[in-house]
Amino acid sequence: MWYLTVSAIVFCYWLGLFIADRSTPNTHIASWLILFVAPLFWPIVLPISIVELMTKSSGQETQDSSVDETAEVYYQNN
């Protein structure tokens, strides 16, 4: 439910920006097409992005812990 609410808010914000933009005429069909087609891919793109972010953050934690272990071994030996 939250996903749909956030999507609707973002879409309305984008629509407002698009209508207020003076650099592209409001009759430009390609702009309208992008505006309406891009949100259709959000259910695919956003979960993939979340998985990538989670993978990177867990990889960073693993890297940090291995650095800590290496530092401990170094200081114990010296």
Image (cartoon, grey):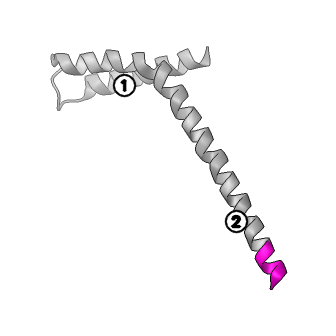
Q: Quadrant of the C terminus?
A: bottom right
Q: Earlier in the sequence, mark 1 or mark 2?
A: 1
Residue drawn where x is 26% and y is 16% of the image: 33
Is 39 drawn above or below residue 69 in the view shown?
above
Is 7 drawn above or below residue 48 in the view shown?
above
Residue interval drawn in magenta: 73-78
Query: Magenta region's main secondary structure?
Result: helix
User: Mark 2 = which residue?
Assistant: 67
Residue reaching furthest to the bottom: 78
Q: CA distance from mark 1 to mark 2?
A: 43 Å
Residue reaching furthest to the front: 77
Instruction: Count residues near mark 1 (Cα–Cα under 10 Å), then give few for <14, some for 14-19, many for 20+.
Output: few
Looking at the picture, which amino acid does disc 1 mark? Trp
User: Mark 1 = which residue?
Assistant: 14
Quarter of the image holding residue 77? Answer: bottom right
Element type at marker 1?
A: helix
Element type at marker 2?
A: helix
Residue reaching furthest to the right: 76
Left or right: 56 in relation to 45 = right
Residue drawn where x is 33% and y is 15% of the image: 36
Q: Quadrant of the N terminus?
A: top right
Horizontal and vertical percent position of residue 66: 72, 61
Quarter of the image holding residue 47? Answer: top right
